[in-house]
Image (tube, rainbow, N blue to C red):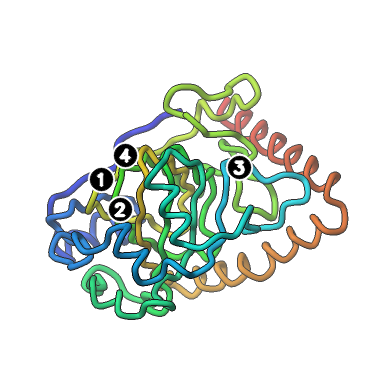
Amino acid sequence: MIVQHIDRVEDITPAEFKKNYYLPRKPVIIAAGGLSKNWPAYSKWTWDYFKSIVGDKTVGVYNNERAGVNTLVNGADDYITFGEYLSMVERGPVALRIFLFNIFQHAPQLVEDFTWPDQLASGFLKKYPMLFVGGAGSVAHMHYDIDLSHIFHTQFLGRKRVLLLENKQAPFIYRMPFTVESAANFVNWHENLDFEQFPALKHAKGYTTILNHGDTMFMPAGYWHHMEYLDGGFAMSLRAMDPTLLGKLNGLYHLVGLRGMNNLMIKMAPTWWYYYKRKLARERANKALQELS
């Protein structure tokens, strides 16, 4: 792949952010001093604190296995209490993660521990700040967010390696039809990729970084992302709707039409659909390669 580092700034004005990143839809890392370091959450949010306030809540956990023939979108692999899960992460390593956990529904006081970056973007979904937690070694496989929101993703405990690709790179990373997933495997992508099975990956253009405590990553709507937890840790995502009507309609289509069709086909013809999606992804990648010639 052709990979460059994501821009990193120590601080940024709203005008600079909108001109250089928001409007061009380019990712950027805002270091802790530029946004999150003044939040109470920066030091207050710890494993013990979360256990004390929501440790008894049941959560869905996800392992590192990629979706199989009969796997519906967003189907959890197991359910345990949040406190049990956090204890496992602390003992680590444990290749289990939680995503889209709205901890704030259970502990609404947590919204007082951070400030919404309204100066940087509009349209924040303020009822839906989400927590993402992972043990060391856990992986969020390559995908893009189905609601097509802009994301402000702040890392707290632990480090996380990130790979981002603009949505138009989809043919080169073997995007499967009616999904937001890639047929290629990006685990340990920085060391090895299967170019023999997926030759178009050589031409994909992406961005990378390692997120540390307090880093906030702006990920524009529709960006593909693959994340690997180097340590046990957690992050919070603040989502902002695309300001354009076309962006909103595209997000609605993804949430209702695309996801619904994929789940319907998994129920009706799981084996055929599983292999057909991968076949079509290869055909589209081969076509993209031919157009480069």
Q: What number is the disc on residue 212?
A: 1
Task: Please name the residue that numbered disc 4 is placed on.
Answer: 209
Which residue is the site of mark 2?
155
Q: Circle 4 sits in a helix, a strand or a loop, which is it?
A: strand
CA distance separating discs 2 and 3 = 25 Å
Rounded to the nearest whole Å, what is the CA distance between mark 4 and mark 2? 12 Å
Neighbours of disc 4 within 10 Å: few (<14), some (14-19), many (20+): some
Could you tell me the amino acid type at mark 2? Gln
Q: Kindly report the distance in space between the C-alpha atoms of the residues bearing marks 3 and 4.
A: 20 Å
The answer to whether the residue labelled 1 contacts the one labelled 2, judged by CB atoms less than 8 Å apart, is: yes
Residue identified by numbered label 3? 182
What amino acid type is highlighted by mark number 1? Answer: Asn
CB contact under 8 Å: marks 1 and 4: no
Marked residue nearer the N-terminal end (4 or 2)? 2
List x then y, in percent, for residue 219.
37, 55
Q: What x and y, as percent, mark residue 178?
A: 69, 55
Q: Amino acid at mark 3?
A: Ser
Query: Which residue appears at 67% of the width and 31% of the height?
Result: 286
Residue 218 position (above or below residue 278) = below
- Label 3: how many residues lie within 10 Å, few (<14), some (14-19) or many (20+)? many
Report the side of 38 relative to 265 (left or right): left
Point out residue 105 in the picture as x, y percentages from the top left corner. Answer: 43, 78
